Image (cartoon, helix red, strand yellow):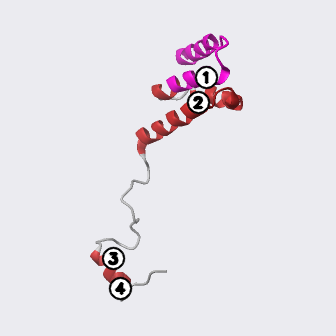
């Protein structure tokens, strides 16, 4: 374990950093915002699609993603559902479900 050669009193350290003791150590916002959240959802849906038919248990979640308010997430969900269901013609069903959801 590393030890400082001379301990610095906390009040001095806080003053030097112009932080109050309750200020977080990072400057990262507590809410990453809609862009980061949307990107995360797109990547999650794409990952399920890359798994392919082995991710069949996620079909219900991917179907819910078709209702996401974000267009990129909905598009990724359509592609992922096609990948998970395989190429046995289920693409038309995904398109119909997506069209029905979008119309509502």
Compare residues 52 and 12 and report the one nearer the observer: 52
Check residue 42 for magenta coloring: no
Q: Nearer the viewer, mark 1 or mark 3?
A: 1
Q: 6 above or below 83?
A: below
Q: Residue furthest bottom?
A: 6
Identify the secondary structure beneath mark 4: loop
The answer to whether the residues at label 3 and label 2 have Cβ atoms under 8 Å apart is no
x then y, percent, for residue 45: 56, 32
x then y, percent, for residue 18: 28, 72
Our reading of the magenta stretch's main secondary structure is helix
Q: Which residue corresponds to mark 2?
A: 50
Q: 93 above or below 67?
A: above
Pointer 1: residues within 10 angstroms few (<14), some, or many (20+)? many
Mark found first going from the N terminus, 2 or 1: 2
Q: Dividing the image into 4 quarters, which one contains the C terminus?
A: top right
Identify the secondary structure beneath mark 1: helix
- Report the label total: 4
Pointer 2: residues within 10 angstroms few (<14), some, or many (20+)? some
The answer to whether the residues at label 2 and label 1 have Cβ atoms under 8 Å apart is yes
Q: Which residue corresponds to mark 3?
A: 14
Mark found first going from the N terminus, 4 or 1: 4
Identify the secondary structure beneath mark 2: helix
Q: Which mark is residue 83?
A: 1
Tell me the distance, in whole angstroms, between the alpha carbons under discs 3 and 2: 48 Å
Tell me the distance, in whole angstroms, between the alpha carbons under discs 4 and 3: 10 Å
x then y, percent, for residue 11: 34, 82
Q: Which residue corresponds to mark 4?
A: 8
Mark found first going from the N terminus, 1 or 3: 3
User: Magenta part of the protein: which range?
Assistant: 75-104
């Amino acid at each position: 374990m590393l030890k400082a050669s001379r301990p610095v009193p906390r009040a001095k350290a806080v003053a030097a950093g112009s932080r109050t003791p309750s200020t977080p150590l990072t400057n990262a916002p507590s809410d990453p915002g809609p862009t980061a959240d949307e990107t995360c959802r797109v990547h999650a849906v794409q990952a399920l699609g890359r798994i392919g038919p082995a991710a069949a248990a996620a079909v219900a979640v991917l179907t819910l993603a078709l209702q996401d308010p974000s267009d990129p997430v909905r598009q990724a969900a359509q592609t992922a559902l096609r990948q998970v269901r395989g190429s046995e013609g289920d693409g038309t069903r995904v398109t119909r479900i997506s069209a029905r959801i979008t119309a509502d």
